[in-house]
Image: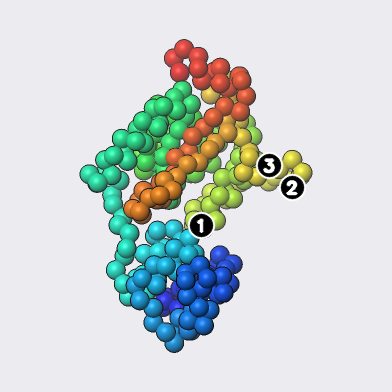
Amino acid sequence: MDFPSALRERRTRRRVSQMDLALRAGTTQRHLSFIESGRSVPGRGMVIRLAESLELPLRERNELLAAAGFAPAYPESSFTDPVLAPVRTAIDHILTGHLPYPAIVVDRNGDLVAANAAFDLITEGAAPGLVGPGANVYRLALHPDGMAPRVLNFPEWARHIVERLSRHPELQAELAQYLPELPTSGEHLGFAVPLHLRTSRGELRLMTTVMTFATAVDVTLAELKLEAFIPADQATSDALHSPGS
């Protein structure tokens, strides 16, 4: 896709008018119109300003720069790269500090990067190929050999998972085959659906929170998500705090 088309597609997808984007980027609507029509060729600084003004993820900012013929502005380091050592240390502290509650870190595809010891309770009985670093946590959640047999509210939970995957159509299509029929009702909770899970410590009801590194300037770091499970009731909290947890 050429730069004018790439810019226009991203602006339209975010429902930002030319006027609004021009104001945010410190230019005129006329100039922006010329850029989107290919009549004007923006410099590197303008491309970066437009990408920032659209609040694009860092990966998309690099893609926009590439479409305009410029080198990426944001590095993409391997998670094991020494430059991210302080990040790995911080993540370890966060995961450990969340104990005895489960917590994980996943990449942009939902593949597991790290987890604390309490996450073992979530993965009990799952097939070895569905767990561990690099395994996809969404597939783990819905696969018949994963968590599915122990999820007591599986229809609601499965729908919750699949609806989160709009940016991953292939994975969404794969996992949709595990989605049971769920009649539409006023009780559908959408993103607030708790996980009701049968475990060796009894039935647990867990909510999740998702955290990101909001000020990251490295693509890998910006795309990491820390998902922390928290008790949805006192019985779950007691079970997770019981001896041996």
Could you say where residue 75 lies in the image, as x and y percent from the top left?
30, 57
Percent position (x, y) of residue 104? 43, 36
Answer with mark 1 or mark 2, whichever residue precedes in sequence: 1
Report the amino acid beneath label 2.
Answer: Thr
- Residue pictured at 61% horizontal, 20% vertical: 234
From the viewer's perspective, is residue 25 above or below residue 206? Answer: below
Q: Residue furthest bottom?
A: 39
Q: At 62% from the left edge and 43% from the top edge, which residue is drawn?
A: 191
| Image location of residue 154, percent across then percent down | 62, 37
Q: Secondary structure at mark 2?
A: loop
List the residue tagged with mark 3: 189
The Cα atoms of the two marked residues, 1 and 2, are separated by 23 Å
Mark number, residue 184: 2
Nearest to viewer (mark 2 / mark 3): 3
Specify the quadrant of the image occupied by residue 17: bottom right
Task: Tell me the distance, in whole angstroms, between the alpha carbons under discs 2 and 3.
Answer: 11 Å
Please indicate, yes or no, whether residue 221 appears anywhere in the rendered image. yes
> In which quadrant of the rendered image does the C terminus lie?
top left
